[in-house]
Image (tube, rainbow, N blue to C red):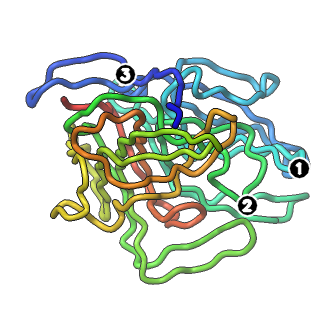
Amino acid sequence: MFPLKRTCILLAATAAIATGTAQEIKYSNFEHWVTREIKESSIIGGKTKTVYCIGPTRHYTAAELAPYNYAKFTPWTTSNVYAKVAGIVKASNSVEPEKRGNGTCVRMDTKVEAVKVLGVIDSSVLVSGSIFTGQTIEPIKSADDPYCNLDFGIPFTGKPKALVLDYKCKISTNDYVMKYPGIGSKRIDGVQDKAEFIVYLQKRWEDKDGRIHALRVGTARVQLDHDVPEWQNGYRVPIHYGDISKTPYYRDYMKLNGPYRALNSKGKVTPIIEEGWGTADDEPTHIIIMLTAGNQGAYIGTVGNTLWVDNVSFEY
């Protein structure tokens, strides 16, 4: 088996807090943003849209449009999209900065992006605003497989006790969700769309055929199912290590093998195959952190769900 290699740029600084040591995640105070102006193709209206990335402060004009190299500059990527399908340029923005006091936080919205071809609505796609550690490989070239351009996780070898953050949210209590996969829409009953905080620590390796395997070393996952209108500062999400499948903490949505993928050494995005639970003694090689306004997966959710987050760090 072969170790996976990539430069780690996750951690930025340390500071004392009441329960231990806090280690900040780079750009996780959300004071620095890359602003990109993307001019969409004339056949779908030719509008110039603003798309945000979490990273070193810079502004790109529409004339400078090019794929953004997330892995080179920042540990974070978002659900924001620069797409070029069959030569047609499209932009989508569901994550953006919002003023908070004297600074900014990150706001994530669930919304429907409608594409009008020659003034007529041709397709509609639901997007749940999300941020996660990893990179989006631009441009998106197809909506058929929403995960084919997503490289989840970055190198990480620490074993923190908890993820700590500030948050508030607006969550619908509807017992149904909508699916907008591009063509048409569908109502799905008996399901509530929830915001989530997810942390997966994995010990990964790659086989000779380029398949990526992993053990789940650490797990943290919290779902938010109601409005929290006031900021919850220093909210703590405990990380549990080893096999948690038989513990009181475990829920079915924490099971192994989600939709996550990663870029292998051959330059191909491939599923991450979680072979089992690691032990508390296993050292992780990668971490996936995902903060999202919706937990139903690609194209499914509730329009209007919103999650605000600020000051993300680890407690040791």
Q: Which residue is mark 2?
A: 144
Residue in the picture at 36% in, 45% down: 200
Residue 232's x, y, as percent? 22, 44
Q: Secondary structure at mark 1?
A: loop
Report the amino acid beneath label 1.
Answer: Ala
Residue 279's x, y, as percent? 25, 46
Q: Is residue 38 left or right of residue 289?
A: right
Residue 237 visible in the shown view? no
Label 1: how many Cα within 10 Å (few below 14, some 14–19, many 20+)? few
Q: Which residue is mark 1?
A: 86
- What is the number of the mark on residue 45? none
Label 3: how many Cα within 10 Å (few below 14, some 14–19, many 20+)? some
Q: Mark 1 vs mark 2: which is more N-terminal?
A: 1
Of residues 41 and 76, the one drawn nearer to the viewer in this rendering: 76
Q: Which residue is mark 3?
A: 11
Q: Mark 2 vs mark 3: which is more N-terminal?
A: 3
Of residues 152 and 236, the one drawn nearer to the viewer in this rendering: 152
Which of discs 1 and 3 lies nearer the camera? The answer is: 3
